[in-house]
Amino acid sequence: SVECKLLPALVKVLETEEGKSIVFTCSALGFLAVSHENQKYMASVELRLLDAIVQIMNRDKGKSREYCCSVTRSLSSAICNKAFMASEHLGLLPVLITVLAEDRGKARANACATVCNLAISTVNKIPMAKPKLGLVKTLIYVIKTDKAEARVNACAALSYLAVAMENKTILLDPVLELLETLKGVIKEDNGKARVNACLTLTNLSVNANGSELLSTKGSSMKQSTKGNLAPLNVPGRNNSLRPIGSMDRFQNMERK
């Protein structure tokens, strides 16, 4: 496509320019990343776009970072991109964790949505929940400190991670205070965050080991399903969170 032919030039801008050029280029990439036809090539190793985005998100805390998170949110919705985007070699997950800890608003919400999309993949669930990475701890921090879209996405991400048998004991480590945090969401939230918090508890209790762990920590949640449940998201391809629409992103730019 015409867009794909332009992408190497846009990546070159990210690698060599700075300032407003980076902001506008990241914004343009956000529009291109929404198209399913572009997503595989945009996340490819040969294009080096994701490498450039990781570098920008590391050094920038402004609009460039926000738009980069929008790009990763869109690209992570494609099944073919999930394994590479969560790989240790790329280094995207540690940067997303930094965004979750430092940012507010759309940057945090989109970073959290990216994490959620990556957690859908079976091959990503176990490495993403490893304590050394610190993702689970940071998602819980987001739930405690954010009551908007980021909280919804964080609860959804945890519900996906809770599906893996190997992750249940990690998630239920009392040091993390996950159960207490989810109970707080259930008590005070009336929307999608509450639903996703309940589904996280349900997925944790699907097997006998999980049920025992929940009961020993005083949870009133009882096992009521024979299978894992998917969190409440906006319907989209591959059960991934829908990326921000082009019109929303354009309007946000105009207001700034």
Image (spheres, grey):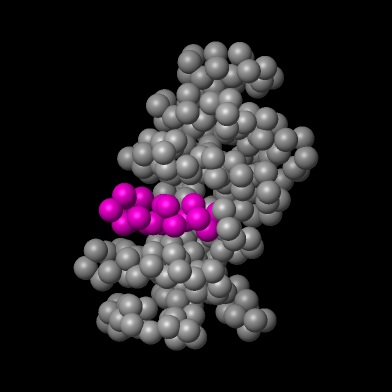
Q: Where is residue 33 shown, x and y percent of the image?
A: 41, 69
Q: Where is residue 117 shown, x and y percent of the image?
A: 45, 50
Q: In which quarter of the image is residue 58?
A: bottom left
Stretch of the chain drawn in magenta: 76-100
Q: Where is residue 52 shown, x and y percent of the image?
A: 35, 70
- Is residue 145 toward the left or the right of residue 175 in the image? right
Vertical relation: 82 (above or below) 231: below
Q: Where is residue 113 shown, x and y percent of the image?
A: 52, 54
- Is residue 94 toward the left or the right of residue 150 in the image? left
Judging depth in this view, the residue of 62 and 128 nearest the camera is 62
- Is residue 148 toward the left or the right of residue 118 in the image? right
Q: Which residue is drawn at 67% across and 17% down?
A: 218
Q: Is residue 64 visible?
A: yes
Q: Which residue is drawn at 28% across and 79% down?
A: 8
Determine if the magenta segment contains residue 87: yes
The residue lying furthest to the left in this view is 46
Count of picture labels: 0
Judging depth in this view, the residue of 178 and 190 nearest the camera is 178
The residue lying furthest to the right in this view is 188
Quarter of the rendering occupied by the N terminus = bottom left
Determine if the magenta segment contains residue 179: no
Vertical relation: 210 (above or below) 148: above
Q: In which quarter of the image is residue 7?
A: bottom left
Q: Residue at x 50, y 74 (%)?
A: 64
Name the chief secondary structure element in magenta: helix
